[in-house]
Amino acid sequence: MSENFTPHLLADELLAAGVPQEIHPMLGRHGVGSLVVKMGIVFTHMSVESMVATMPVDGNTQVTGLLHGGAHVVLAETLGSFAAAFHAGPGSKVVGIEINATHHRGVAAGLVTGTATPIHLGRTLATHEVVMTDEQGRRLSTCRITNMILAR
């Protein structure tokens, strides 16, 4: 954690990322992470059953002007990891152990929405499917992420 950390700055980061105030204590001193901030990811729904966030294409493109494939994976890993943490509960830690992605179509502008839904919610593993869509609802990519739930 940065030595410049203050609870006020963390609260601002969480609110900017769309995290409801009642969830702030669950994130402790970690916030949403600097990559989430850099990518412009904003949560729009947070629950065990469904984790949804948006990410702008602008600023996250590859050299040809399309959304970078790695940006899809960053969004998927963010959603899957937060969803696994919700399942695991307060005080638990989760770590990603596997992720894969299939890219179905490119996108050059607008906002991408990612939706994580559980495939398996166990005691030690949580697996989610994460689907990214464009503003017209067209599927851009499908990812699957498995997180290991570590003991409290």
Image (cartoon, rainbow, N blue to C red):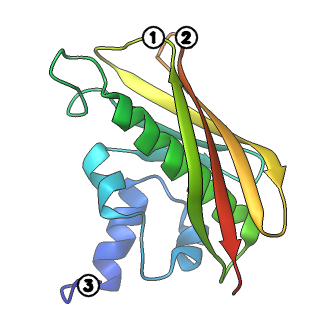
Q: Is residue 26 left or right of residue 30?
A: right
Q: Dot 1: within a 10 Å radius of its alpha carbon, few (fewer than 14), some, or many (20 or more) residues?
A: few
Give the mark nearer the N terminus: 2 vs 1.
1
**Amino acid tagged 3:** Phe
Q: Nearer the viewer, mark 3 or mark 1?
A: 1
From the image, tell me which residue sits under label 1. Answer: 105
Q: Quadrant of residue 70?
A: top left
Q: Are marks 3 and 1 in contact (CB under 8 Å)?
A: no
**Position in image of residue 105 (x %, y %):** 45, 10
From the image, tell me which residue sits under label 2. Answer: 138
Location of the C terminus by quadrant is bottom right
Q: Are marks 2 and 1 in contact (CB under 8 Å)?
A: yes
Location of the N terminus by quadrant is bottom left
Q: Is residue 22 left or right of residue 136?
A: right
Q: Disc number at residue 5? A: 3
**Amino acid tagged 1:** Arg
108 lies above or below 94: above
Give the mark nearer the N terminus: 2 vs 3.
3
Could you say which is closer to the camera, residue 114 or residue 135?
114
Q: Quadrant of residue 117?
A: top right
Disc 3/disc 1 C-alpha distance (Å): 40 Å
- Disc 2 on helix, strand or loop? loop
Q: Which residue is situated farthest in the left direction here?
A: 63
Which residue lies at the image location 51% right of the left edge and 13% below the top edge? Answer: 104
**Amino acid tagged 2:** Arg
**Position in image of residue 139 (x %, y %):** 56, 15
- Disc 3 on helix, strand or loop? loop
